[in-house]
Amino acid sequence: MRKVIVIILAILFMIPVFWTVSSSLKSMNEIYRYPPTIFPQEISLEGYKNVINESQFPRYVANTLFVAIVSTVITVFISVSLGYGLAKGTFKYKNFFLEMVTITLFITAQVIMVPLFVVIQRLGLIDSLWGLIIPAVFTPTASFTAYQYMKDLPNEFLESAQVDGANEWQIFLKIVLPMSRPLMAAISIFSFTWRWNDFVLPLIVINSGDKFTVQLALSALQGQYGIPWNEILAFSVLAIIPTLIIFLLFQNLFMKGLSAGGLKY
Amino acid sequence: MKKIDIVKNRFVFIVPSFVFHFLFYLLPIILMIILAFFSWDLLNTPSFVGLENFKDLIHDKWFWNSIVVTLEYTFLTLPIVFVTSLILGLLLQEENRFSKVMRVFFYWPYMIPMVAGGTMWKWLLSRDFGLINHILVQLGFNPVSWLENPTSALFSVVIVQAWILSGFMMMLYIVGLQALPQEFYEAASIDGASNFQKFWFITMPLLRNTHISVITLTIANCFKNFTVVYIMTTGGPGYATTVAPLYIYQKAFTDFRIGYASAGSIVILLISVVIAYVVRKVQERDLEEGKI
């Protein structure tokens, strides 16, 4: 009984996905037929072919991958470094800096979009892929996770390295980084997903079509006149595949959330 | 033996993060406050206008409408997410194969990029070619223009937001339910409590912490939402689904009224801060009363 309810609810949750995949496999002729067919009468890859051949789809993927990978590398490095400094350092106003990270958890791009645009413009990053990377590398969630993780890192390792005469950089590179592998993996996975799915920043930063990210291109496609829906839906399916694969591979990590509790060195 | 001095400055390690933090969080907030006193179209020199933007804002009926729409959007989504995620959490709390597999289906909408998710729903709700209307017609009802009618458009974007958030909140309930102490249930069974009584008088109060997290996160997520509405209705029909962040976006990037949009952003930021503050107070009060 319980299982039946769960399965019915899961089917309800998956209806939008089912309808999208089913429709994306219809020919242009069939997709605009009234009344609609539930399953495609004849599987047609027309939508997918048109998206890949006629739009600049490979370009959008390349742009998004570039943005997601570069910003993820920077995010991992600065977050781990920040977490280490905040958790194992003893400088003035440390709590003030910690409080600053916490506050940013409440500030989102949607709320400060207008002045953020002005800052990005002054830095000359409008309509550049770097304008999607540099403003996004600091994230409060990754920083906070790194801080939590570093707090639990045993001091003995750092102390014994100091006794052996290692300097700060050697300690960071040879002890802290290797011990942070699970943390770095988790931040990478989350950061990549955030950047791939991001929409607000590309919307305000990018103007030219050849610099569109996948999500921005999907949004722009719907503003154009005469683009058939089988193409729009094929594009949607392609746009969700990369993060679906990452989600299925790392589902435990995602469902537990990015909390240090689940990470062990 | 000399105690090793591990006290190290290590300030240098936080510098890179705080450069970015300053440029893209602090500076925009400072700039937002300054720009709110100027009139600026991004091209000409900004001119100082004093409190003019705020005065206009007070009389801007569509701005206040967008705040009301945001609140409606948030507080219509909240009960749906609350009930759905609690039910899903109760149904899937056990750690077995079936639960683990099914959780993926409910959580997945949270992982789908909102642009793609919104697009998918738009097609599902299409008047002539959508599955929902097709089923309604089969059942003998008239087709509904879901996104063209003000009430059903708001209802539609609320459903999509609930679809996105419920699986995520379900995981919070699963974690909360798994941490509940079993003694209470045993005692209640001895006293002859029914399943519903156990749920209502034991489970619900003990989940108080999880309820607070679910409510806070749902409000925060709804309040900032922009993408779902932008994709599905662009705020329409009329201003029926124009949430506050979307209104600000239009003022800034369609009308090029940067100063005015900044003034509006300050109001939204203040409302978010008030909400965050109230929630924090509730949590602190709970801490003092030892409920956590």
Image: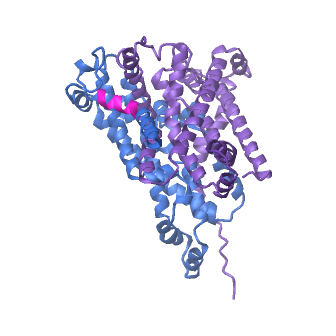
Chain colours: A blue, B purple
Q: Can you tell which quarter of the image residue A150 is in?
A: bottom right
Q: Nearer the viewer, residue B190 or A265?
A: B190
Residue at 37%, 30% in the rendered image: A217
Instruction: Give the extent of the magenta segment.
Output: A14-23
Residue at 63%, 60% in the rendered image: A86
Instruction: Locate residue A258 relative to residue A94 in the image: left or right.
Output: left
Q: Main secondary structure of the magenta part?
A: helix
Q: Is residue A71 in sight in this rendering?
A: no
Q: Residue furthest top?
A: B142
Counting labels gives 0
Q: Nearer the viewer, residue B168 or A265?
A: B168
Instruction: Locate residue A127 relative to residue A46 in the image: left or right.
Output: right
Q: Nearer the viewer, residue B276 or B292?
A: B292
**Can you give x and y, in whole percent of width and height, for residue A134 in the image?**
49, 44
Q: Is residue B91 in sight in this rendering?
A: yes
Vertical arrangement, residue A6 with respect to residue B71, above or below:
below
Q: Can you tell which quarter of the image residue A234 is in?
A: top left
Q: Nearer the viewer, residue A130 or B102?
A: B102
Vertical arrangement, residue A170 with respect to residue A205, above or below:
below
Vertical arrangement, residue A131 with respect to residue B152, above or below:
below
Residue at 61%, 64% in the rendered image: A151
Q: Can you tell which quarter of the image residue B48 is in?
A: top right
Vertical arrangement, residue B237 with respect to residue B110, above or below:
above
**Can you give x and y, in whole percent of width and height, for residue A112 in the image?**
60, 34
Residue at 56%, 75% in the rendered image: A157
Instruction: Locate residue B257 relative to residue A175 in the image: left or right.
Output: right
Q: Residue furthest bottom?
A: B1
**Can you give x and y, in whole percent of width and height, for residue A128 in the image?**
42, 37
Q: Is residue A21 covered in magenta?
A: yes
**Can you give x and y, in whole percent of width and height, for residue A220 in the image?**
39, 25
Q: Is residue B266 covered in magenta?
A: no
